[in-house]
Amino acid sequence: METRQLNKEGRELWNRKARFWDELHGDEGNLFHRRLVEPSILQLLALQNGERVLDVGCGNGALARRLAGKGANITALDFSEEMIRLAKGRGFASDIDYRIVDATDKDALLSLGTAHFDAIVCSMTLMDIPIVAPLFEAASELLRAEGRFVFATMHPSFNSNNPVFFQEKQDRDGVVTRVAGVKILAYLDLPPVKGSGAPGEPAPHYYYHRPLSALFQEAFEAGFLLDGLLEPAFSPEDADLGPELSWTGMWQIPPVLSARLRLA
C-alpha cells in the first residue's frame, strides 16, 4: 500500500477511535504519558515562559495543556478532526491554537509561519507517521535560529512493531523467582503493521518502524544535530501499577526514546 493511502487510512482509524483515546488520556494523560513521556519531554524542552511552541500530533491535547499551563504560547495540530474536536472540549481551549494539519504535508506545516516557533514537540507520534522527512524538513524552517525540536517515540530497539513479552522461572542460589523480558525478532527492516496502542482499542492503527540510524538520518538530512537523548523506563516501585507482563515490570528496558534536536 502506498504512503498516501496508508496515511488516509490512518486518519480514518484515528477518527474512529478518538473518543476511546480521549477517555484513556483524560486531562493529564495516562500512566505511560505521565511517568515516562511527559517528564522526558519537559526535561529536554527546558521551556521558558512565553515561548512559542508547536505541538505536532497533539491528540487530545494533554501535553499542549501542560505546556500552556507553564506559560507557553501553544499551537497544537493533529490530522484527526475528531481528536481536535475533543481536545477543544478540555481545559485551556481558549489559550491553545488548535489546527487540523497533516504532519506529512510540508506545505501545510510551513503555512504556520517560517521562523515562528521557539520549539517544536512531537509526543509519541513519529511511529504513527508513514513518512517523517516532510516534518523534519518543515521543522527546520518553522523554528527560529536557536530553536529546538523535542520528540518522544516508542523506542525502536525495544518497543517497536509488537515486541514479544516473556516470563520465565529462575533458580538463583536456591531462590526461585520469575523474570520478565522482551524478545526482539527483527530490527533493521520491518514493514508497517497494525497494532493496539492500549487494551480494548476499537481500531488498531499502523505502526511504522525505523531503526535508530534511519530515524536520525532523516533529521540530520534536514539540517538538525542531536543535542540530547533520554531513555525513560519505569522504576521497580512501579511494578504493581500494571499487569504482570507489562512495561511497568521491566525497569531495565526503556520503552520510550526521547531526543532533542537543534539546527546545525
Image: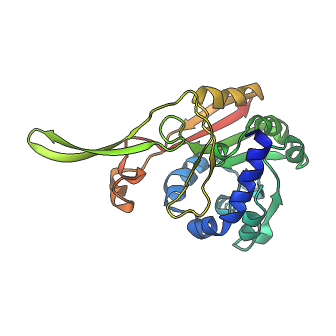
Residue located at (84% from left, 42% from top): 142
Is 68 drawn above or below residue 149 in the view shown? Answer: below
Query: For residue 104, which quarter of the picture?
Result: top right
Q: Does any portion of residue 102 appear in the rendered image?
A: yes
Residue located at (64% from left, 47% from top): 206
Query: For residue 137, which quarter of the picture?
Result: top right
Quadrant for the C terminus in the image: top right
**Residue 40 as seen in the image, left or right of residue 14:** left
Quadrant for the N terminus in the image: top right
Residue 96: x and y in percent read 78, 64
Is 22 drawn above or below residue 194 in the view shown? Answer: below
**Residue 115 as seen in the image, left or right of residue 216:** right
**Residue 27 as seen in the image, left or right of residue 50:** left
Is 241 drawn above or below residue 108 in the view shown? Answer: below
Residue located at (69% from left, 48% from top): 121
In the rendered picture of this protein, how many numbered marks are placed on residues? Answer: 0
Instruction: Give the farthest residue toward the front.
Output: 1
Residue 222: x and y in percent read 77, 29
Residue 160: x and y in percent read 53, 41
Q: Does any portion of residue 69 appear in the rendered image?
A: no
Scheme by which the image is coloured: rainbow
Is 211 drawn above or below residue 168 in the view shown? Answer: above
Residue 44: x and y in percent read 61, 43
Query: For residue 169, which quarter of the picture?
Result: top left
Instruction: Give the farthest residue toward the left.
Output: 174
